[in-house]
Image (cartoon, rainbow, N blue to C red):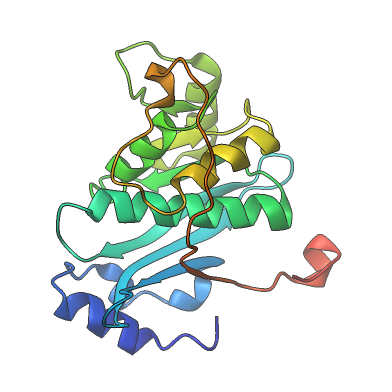
């Protein structure tokens, strides 16, 4: 985390047309997980995703604190790919969190979070993504979290199937998988990984550092 050139990241994104947000002045050192996406042609930064781990075991969850991408038709796909990337890394390094949460009123990340949920088996959204059927267990989790925005409840899905679905989305394919509408299994293909940086954990908290 200490090696990230935050002024360069934010300057590239704002120069490319990404709307400036409060994360420009926020203490970014508080983020526990960061994904940076770069343009493969120009090398300039094209996306920023920052999360903070909250809660306590066994109900650790992740708040999406910062999300900036270049404008355009692929904005939601890029956000979704960054979410899939960071979630896959967290599952591999630390185990599956209980949920991903978007802050209240953040219209930039909630569509990508909902799109991610539609492409992962057995997860639930609150408020619900499809129709008006509320899952009470997920609604109860949302109340305990108290984030105020949409949450993606990951408790019902096992880590293996979750990783397979995330790897299918990792490269930000132009077509959405829509697993809930499919009857055939999804073929998982390797995708290029966006850069990701994880803040080391304190040994007093986890008993190990990563």
Rendering coords of residue 58 (x, y %): 73, 40
Rendering coords of residue 190 (x, y %): 54, 52
Rendering coords of residue 191 (x, y %): 49, 55
Q: Quadrant of the C terminus?
A: bottom right
Decide which of 40, 107 is in the foreground and name it: 40
Residue 80 visible within the image: yes
Decide which of 39, 52 is in the foreground and name it: 39
Residue 149 visible within the image: no
Q: Quadrant of the N terminus?
A: bottom right
Q: Please report the residue visible at 47 percent of the width from the left and 15 percent of the height from the top.
A: 135
Rendering coords of residue 193 (x, y %): 50, 63
In the image, is residue 151 above or below residue 84? above
Lateral position of residue 95 relative to residue 73, left or right: right
- Outermost residue, top direction? 133
In the image, is residue 25 above or below residue 95? below
Lateral position of residue 162 relative to residue 203, left or right: left
Locate residue 13: give its quadrant.
bottom left
In the image, is residue 181 above or below residue 173? above
* Count of numbered marks: 0
Q: Please report the residue visible at 86 percent of the width from the left and 64 percent of the height from the top.
A: 207
Lateral position of residue 106 relative to residue 195, left or right: left
Q: Please report the residue visible at 42 percent of the width from the left and 54 percent of the height from the top.
A: 171
Q: Please report the residue visible at 59 percent of the width from the left and 51 percent of the height from the top.
A: 88
Locate residue 89: give its quadrant.
bottom right
Lateral position of residue 78 relative to residue 50, left or right: left
């Amino acid at each position: 985390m200490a090696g990230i050139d935050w002024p360069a990241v934010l300057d590239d994104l704002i120069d490319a047309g990404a709307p400036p947000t409060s994360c420009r002045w926020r203490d970014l050192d508080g983020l526990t997980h960061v994904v940076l996406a770069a343009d493969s042609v120009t090398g300039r930064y094209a996306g920023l995703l920052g999360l903070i781990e909250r809660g306590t075991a066994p109900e650790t969850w992740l708040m999406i604190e910062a999300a900036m991408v270049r404008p355009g038709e692929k904005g939601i796909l890029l956000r979704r790919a960054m979410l899939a990337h960071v979630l896959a890394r967290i599952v591999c390094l630390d185990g599956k969190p209980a949920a991903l949460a978007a802050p209240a009123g953040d219209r930039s990340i909630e569509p990508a979070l909902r799109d991610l949920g539609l492409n992962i088996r057995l997860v639930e959204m609150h408020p619900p993504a499809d129709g008006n059927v509320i899952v009470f267990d997920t609604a109860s989790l949302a109340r305990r979290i108290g984030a105020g925005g949409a949450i993606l409840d990951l408790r019902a899905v096992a880590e293996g199937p979750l990783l397979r679905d995330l790897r299918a989305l990792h490269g930000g394919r132009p077509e959405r998988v829509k697993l809930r509408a499919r009857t055939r299994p999804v073929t998982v293909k390797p995708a290029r990984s966006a850069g990701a940086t994880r803040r080391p954990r304190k040994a007093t908290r986890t008993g190990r550092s990563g």
